[in-house]
Image: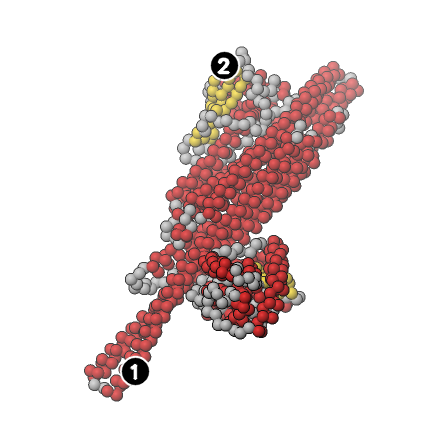
């Protein structure tokens, strides 16, 4: 899922690298310039001024001439995350935000460098200061409600490394972000398939109730010819979607394993994933989809939110399956159309070459060329059909399965609670019996038992509450993301269709005069 | 097919494969109506004429496909028309495609919603109608080519076909017994060999022969490939139909989480159905009608032209044989007069065939070029229209979705 407000999913591979390269240089350029300007001021000033404690960027002291230097001290003391040499402009912005946003729920809200704010503070003009203050305060407030943060991930450049038996495919994982928890704004690493599996293994245990961590590669394990370009492309796209879903989830993003995966140059080879390849992996992944109809136990709840939600999810899964089947059929038929069009085009060209009327002959060969162009258009459209629609649907069918998994887990927790409660009941009954039978020596044991189980019951009650709350939140978050994701993809798909139709119009319009020229 | 299926009486149909028929008001033929009963299609053939040879100035008769075939065959067998390109017989009405789909739809009725079923049935009925219109057109064009030709329009059997208010079944049976399709079968099996084998003296016919043989195989190939392509295109359109149906289900279903978050989607998806699936379908149909049908028709017409060449080649062979027979007779001194007469007749026949053949083939060239031009232009204009339509509908849908 590539969601998040203000974030766009990375463009398709061919456009991507170019764009990213451009972005890279832009970002770096602006930073370097400012760095040069400020470096001297901050560092020369810092040493001679005393450190003044600051709580909030109120007007007055901070924004006086000395204030600018004081702030840099604040920068040194409170912000140890960044290396001094780089992006001073950026870190100043950071500082302002953490000071104002202490009430935010631990979420990092980062806005891009507020160039204007920082620059103006260097004007050592006391008249300007009050306006500077208000301006920056306003900007901060605005930006806080804007809730933008940038995190774009792309998986590109599949490269074959090594030879023969030990050969593997290595992918470039590029991240572009304005989040401060990363060392850089843009960076990339190379990862191989087993690295992805390793990541999955690490996080799946820790985040059992998160929907989105699932490694949805049922189709990419084993069966297909792993050297074909199509397979590599499918896998690359699937890995990209996987990472995008992972970082779209707030708690996964916070996980250090995820960050390490994105940032660290060399990852230790995930050894366990040996067992995960092939049938082992399939079995593990299939666990997700095996969580069908195991939920025969009904939880006695006052609120039937869970029951009706589960029904909704199951219902939706069925509908999506049907939709996916229809899209699959479309992909296949369009591929057929491609090959039939090419064959037809050749046939028309042959006909044109035999035609004795010269104008008609020319028109027929032009028609053959038009059909050739059609074929290319159909090819591209088939590509869009598959990658924009079919894969999306396939993913979501399985993700809905994962949602059901969450429900199932909650059910298990409830079951455990029930069992504990019944055990507690039994222990109490046992104690009562002992009391009646007047066997004081065993009584203490019984009392201990009761205590043990009472605390277990209350523990499990708390667990159940917690899981209920988490699952509920998670499902709601997932639904929102899903709706947004779907809409984004449908719009993208329609745009691809629009593009195709535009080109179609152009093709035929170019042909029309040729047809009219027949005499 | 359950029950009768009637075309509406106002078929405004562009005569796509042959042009400028029905220009002559002295004999105007059209097929304004047709009924489809089970396997049989009954065409209403309507004639308006100012010619005195006909009994009435205007009348209509019911004819079946087999009657058309009978008419075609009798004309082929008529010696007098040997030097003419005989308009190809219309192909048998083929409802197999839509019929099969209708059957499948009936089987799958239980697994889809009432709305979806109704929509799909509608689409299928439209497809049926399209096949129907096509077969009517092709039968109509056949008659019109006959009526616009100076020789054929005077044909006695043609007049019977148009006028005779009774069933032609009996006549048909008799004709079959008489000829047994002899001539036709012969032509089909031997023409290529004979035509290529004969020593050609006339430059024009030499060129024509080479051209027609080559062109014939290429256009047959192009027709087959066009049919495959059009079928794929229709499959794609069909898939879009299913997709938009499925999307509709999701958006309309109250029991999914989608409903809450994707507000205007039902409306958009319905629009999508129109913009994508219907347009794709129309694009495929129009391409079929203008291009594939054109190629199909001319494959048949080229065959008719080849048949003419064959008959001429036969006449030439006969003439050469008569020459040899005359020489032999002269040597033997027996039956010379007869042999001379025979030779004279063969030569006459051959010359007549050559003369009219040349005229026919020349006008055939012109007719073919004109028809191709017309159809290619019409197809292109239609494709552009549909694509532009699709563009604006898609833009509208995208805007609605984005603004949400």
Check disc 1 and report the residue beneath it. Answer: A448
Q: Nearer the viewer, residue A307 or A261?
A: A261
Residue labelled with disc 2: B57
Q: Position of residue B358 (x, y in %)?
A: 69, 23
Residue B386: x and y in percent read 53, 37
Q: In the depicted view, which residue is nearer to us: A446 or B321?
A: A446
Dividing the picture into quadrants, the one containing residue B356 is top right
- Total marks drawn? 2
Rendered view: A381 above or below B184:
below
Say left or right for A132 vs B375. Answer: left
Which residue lies at the image location 36% right of the left edge and 58% below the top edge?
A: A309
**Looking at the picture, do discs 1 and 2 lie on one chain?**
no
Mark 1–mark 2 CB contact (< 8 Å): no
What subunit carries mark 2? B
Q: CA distance from mark 1 to mark 2?
A: 116 Å
Residue lying at the far top in this picture: please name it: B52
Q: Residues within 10 Å of mark 1 (few under 14, many from 20)?
A: few
């Amino acid at each position: 899922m590539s969601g998040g407000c203000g974030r766009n999913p990375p463009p398709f591979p061919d456009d991507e690298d170019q764009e990213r390269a451009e972005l890279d240089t832009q970002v770096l350029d602006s930073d370097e310039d400012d760095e040069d300007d400020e470096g001297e001021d901050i560092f020369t000033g810092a040493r001679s001024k005393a450190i003044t404690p600051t709580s909030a960027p109120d007007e007055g002291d901070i924004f006086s001439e000395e204030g600018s230097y004081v702030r840099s001290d604040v920068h040194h003391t409170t912000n140890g995350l960044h290396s001094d040499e780089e992006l001073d402009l950026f870190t100043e912005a950071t500082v302002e935000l953490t000071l104002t946003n202490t009430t935010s729920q631990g979420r990092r809200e980062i806005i891009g460098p507020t160039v204007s704010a920082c620059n103006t503070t260097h004007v050592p003009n006391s008249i300007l200061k009050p306006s500077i203050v208000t301006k920056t305060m306003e900007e901060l407030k605005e930006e806080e409600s804007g809730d933008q943060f940038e995190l774009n991930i792309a998986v590109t450049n599949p490269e074959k490394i090594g030879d023969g038996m030990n050969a593997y495919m290595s992918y470039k994982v590029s991240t572009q972000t304005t989040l401060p928890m990363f060392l850089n704004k843009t960076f990339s690493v190379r990862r191989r398939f087993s690295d992805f599996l390793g990541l999955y293994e690490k996080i799946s245990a820790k985040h059992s109730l998160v929907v989105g961590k699932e490694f949805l590669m049922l189709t990419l394990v084993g069966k297909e010819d792993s050297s074909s370009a199509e397979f590599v492309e499918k896998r690359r796209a699937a890995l990209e979607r996987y990472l995008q879903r992972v970082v779209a989830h707030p708690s996964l993003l916070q996980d250090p394993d995820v960050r390490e995966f994105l940032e660290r140059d060399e990852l230790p080879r995930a050894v366990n994933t040996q067992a995960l390849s092939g049938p082992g992996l399939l079995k593990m992944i299939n666990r997700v989809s095996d969580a069908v109809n195991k939920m025969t136990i009904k939880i006695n709840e006052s609120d039937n939110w869970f029951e009706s939600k589960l029904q909704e999810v199951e219902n939706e899964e069925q509908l999506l399956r049907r939709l996916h089947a229809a899209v699959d059929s479309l992909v296949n038929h369009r591929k057929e159309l491609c090959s039939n069009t090419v064959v037809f085009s050749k046939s028309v060209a042959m006909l044109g070459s035999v035609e004795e009327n010269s104008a008609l002959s020319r028109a027929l060969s032009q028609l053959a060329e038009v059909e050739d162009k059609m074929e290319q258009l159909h090819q591209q459209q088939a590509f869009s059909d598959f990658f924009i629609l079919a894969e999306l649907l396939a993913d979501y069918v399985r993700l809905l399965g994962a949602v059901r998994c969450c429900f199932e887990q909650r059910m298990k927790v409830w079951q455990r609670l029930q069992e504990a409660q019944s055990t507690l009941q039994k222990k109490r009954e046992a104690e009562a019996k002992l009391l009646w039978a007047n066997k004081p020596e065993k009584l203490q044991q019984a009392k201990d038992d009761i205590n043990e189980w009472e605390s277990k019951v209350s523990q499990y009650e708390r667990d159940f509450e917690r899981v209920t709350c988490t699952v509920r939140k998670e499902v709601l978050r997932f639904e929102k993301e899903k709706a947004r994701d779907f809409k984004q993809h449908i719009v993208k798909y329609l745009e691809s269709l629009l593009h195709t139709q535009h080109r179609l119009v152009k093709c035929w319009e170019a042909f029309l005069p040729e047809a009219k020229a027949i005499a | 097919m359950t029950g009768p299926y009637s075309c509406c009486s106002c078929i405004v149909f562009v005569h796509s494969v042959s042009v400028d028929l029905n220009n002559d008001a002295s004999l105007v033929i059209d097929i304004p109506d047709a009924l489809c009963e089970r396997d049989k299609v009954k065409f209403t053939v309507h004639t308006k004429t100012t010619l005195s040879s006909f009994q009435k100035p205007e009348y209509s008769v019911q004819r079946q496909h087999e009657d058309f075939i009978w008419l075609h065959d009798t004309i082929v067998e008529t010696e007098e028309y040997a030097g003419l390109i005989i308009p190809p017989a219309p192909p048998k009405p083929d409802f197999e495609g839509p019929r099969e789909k209708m059957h499948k739809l009936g089987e799958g009725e239980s697994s889809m919603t009432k709305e979806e079923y109704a929509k799909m049935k509608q689409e299928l009925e439209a497809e049926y109608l399209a096949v129907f219109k096509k077969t009517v057109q092709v039968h109509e064009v056949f008659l019109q080519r006959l009526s616009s030709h100076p020789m054929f329009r005077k044909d006695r059997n043609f007049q019977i076909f148009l006028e005779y208010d009774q069933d032609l079944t009996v006549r048909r049976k008799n004709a079959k017994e008489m000829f047994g399709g002899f001539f036709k079968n012969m032509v089909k099996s031997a023409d290529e060999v004979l035509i290529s084998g004969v020593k050609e003296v006339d430059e024009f016919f030499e060129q024509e022969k080479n051209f027609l043989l080559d062109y014939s195989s290429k256009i047959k190939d192009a027709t087959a490939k066009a049919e495959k392509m059009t079928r794929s295109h229709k499959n794609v359109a069909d898939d879009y139909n299913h997709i938009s149906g499925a999307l509709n289900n999701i958006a309309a279903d109250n029991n999914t989480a989608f409903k809450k978050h994707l507000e205007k989607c039902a409306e958009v998806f319905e629009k999508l159905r129109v913009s994508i699936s219907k347009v794709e379908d129309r694009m495929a149909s129009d391409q079929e009608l203008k291009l594939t049908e054109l190629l199909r028709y001319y494959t048949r017409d080229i065959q008719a032209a080849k048949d003419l060449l064959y008959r001429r080649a036969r006449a030439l062979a006969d003439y050469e044989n008569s020459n040899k027979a005359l020489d032999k007779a002269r040597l033997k001194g027996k039956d010379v007069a007869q042999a001379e007469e025979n030779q004279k007749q063969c030569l006459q026949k051959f010359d007549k065939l050559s003369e009219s053949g040349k005229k026919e083939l020349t006008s055939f060239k012109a007719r073919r070029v004109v028809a191709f031009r017309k159809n290619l232009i019409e197809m292109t204009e239609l494709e552009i229209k549909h694509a532009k339509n699709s563009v604006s509908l898609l833009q509208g849908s995208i805007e609605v979705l984005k603004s949400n």
